[in-house]
Structures are given as structure tokens and as C-alpha cells.
Amino acid sequence: MSALSLGKATIHRVEEHSLPVSLRLLTEDEALLARCVDPLPQGFLNRESMNFVFSNHSWLVRVDGSTVLVDPCTGNGRKGRGPYFDDLDVPYLERLAAIGVTPDDVDVVFSTHLHHDHCGWNTVQMDGEWVPTFPSATYVFTEAELRRWGSVDSPRHPNSFNPNVFDECVRPVMEAGLARVVSAPYDISPSLTVEAAPGHTVGHAVLRLASDGVRAYFTGDAFHHPVQLTQPELHLPGCDNLEEAIATRRELVRRILDEEAYIFPAHFPDPHYGRLALADGEASFVPGGADQAQAV
């Protein structure tokens, strides 16, 4: 994907890798698929396999003089993450370099939540230890999410679902003095605000961009596939609080429609972002850009 210009912001996608996921895990409603998925590019549903492409990528946002990395994926050489995620060896940092960004250039790292595929590149292994990848950055974590994964008092012990992630990907950042623990809403810059979007995890948040009248939401795992924009009650397994996740999806859909905003999810296939349309009271995903999103 080429860089996009929204307002005064420039946005790049930084790919890690992708994997096939069955859409049957979300829905087998043929009428819904015909209405809202079949018109989309094939990555959103391969009718032969009934899989969609589950893309793992970060968003890099340059605005207000800052370079902000959103959701830095899983990382290389990890263990215990499961099929498709263990022992990755991908040129993620080289892809950052290809768009002119070195680790030292990153000013802010923001994880919408602390599942392994959203905070892994926080650190890299050096001399047998995990150390911060972006030594000049401020790593922004919501207090609720940090408590969820870093506390032994969490209602569900973090390592039962997300093994080693806090110790490998968060603790080294905190020990290096690079973490900033915030309560949402929190302004990263005049154009970027962290906003609470709980449910998928207790402290899940989104990043809202508002620049020159253009708005966009970097939604993390609030949505895994466009069918959830149309029917927010659909879900993949793994939510901390499903009822809250559904309420969050409904509210985000309302706001995205009301604001005519762009949506930049963490896992949608090519073209990876888009907008929403409303017809007969039903929201649907419109992939890609419009007049305000121009390749640069």
C-alpha cells in the first residue's frame, strides 16, 4: 500500500505476515456474506476455502512532527504464541527502513492492547535479553491494560492466554524508563487521541486521528473482519468481556458513520483500510480511499 495523506497526517502500513482464518468462526449467514462480503476484494473471503486473509501489520502515522507506530505485531523468534506466530523470521524492521524510518526515528509506540500480536516488536533480543527496539520512543500503555496483563491479581492469569508477553514485551520497556502509563482519553499529540474501547481486552483502546477536518480510527482488534461492522455481535474467540466488546463495536460504528471517518484495523486484508456506508439501516465496509486519502 502506498502512503496515504489524511489531513496533515501521512500513514504507512508496515507488514509483518498473514495467515488464513475461517470466516465460519464469525458467521455462516449466506445472505450476510452475499450482501456485505462477496462485493469486497477476494482477501476478505475465498469462497472455495471459506477463509479470509488475516493480516498482521502495524500502522505508522506521521503528524504534528511525531512518528507514531501503532500495534507493533508479534516479533521474531518468539515462543508459545502458537501456529503461524512462533519462530517468525520476517523483515519487519527492514520494511520500516524501506519507508525511511529507523528504530531511532520512532517517537511514540502505542499498543491498542497487549495481546502478543500488538506489542511484540516493542522489544528485540540482544545478547540473550529482550531490550527495547525503539530506544528514543515513548511507549504508551493504558493503565487498565497494563494492570490486566502485569498483575497477578488479574481475574484470569495473563500467562494462561498470552504467555510470556508481559515479561518479554512490556517489562523491559518499563525497566528502561520508556513507558508512559495513561488513562484514556489521552492526547498523544494535537491530532492523535487514545480513547477507551474495552471488551476485546479490559484496557483495549483505539487511536483517533483528527486533522484538517479529516478523521480516522486505528481500531486494533475491535474489528477483525468487516462482517463485524455490519453485525457487531459477531466475534472471534478470546474477548475478556464479550458484552462490552459488542457495545464498543456498536459505538465505534456509530461514530465512524457520523464522522464520515476512515477505519484502520489491525488485521483487515488488502487494501487494509476504508470507510463505512449505510443503506437501509445497515452498515457496510467500503474498502480503500476516497478524495481525502491520496497516495503520496
Image: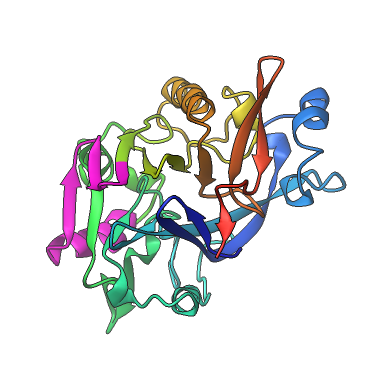
Quadrant (top left/top right/bottom left/bottom right) for the N terminus: bottom right
Q: Work out whether 102 lies above or below 248.
A: below
List the single residue furthest toward the right.
48
Residue 209 placement (x, y as % from top left): 39, 44
User: Looking at the image, can residue 57 be seen?
Assistant: yes
Residue 171 covered by magenta stretch = yes
Q: Work out whether 87 lies above or below 252.
A: below
Residue 125 covered by magenta stretch = no
Count of numbered marks: 0
Colouring mode (rainbow / by chain / secondary structure / one colour): rainbow
Would residue 290 be found to the left or right of residue 9 on screen? right
Q: Kindly identify the residue that appears in the image at 48 percent across and 41 percent down.
A: 221
Residue 44 placement (x, y as % from top left): 72, 46
Q: Kindly identify the residue that appears in the image at 61 percent across and 33 percent down.
A: 276
Residue 124 placement (x, y as % from top left): 34, 73
Quadrant (top left/top right/bottom left/bottom right) for the C terminus: bottom right
Would residue 244 be found to the left or right of residue 24 on screen? left
Q: Work out whether 224 lies above or below 276.
A: below
Q: Which residues are magenta?
A: 165-193
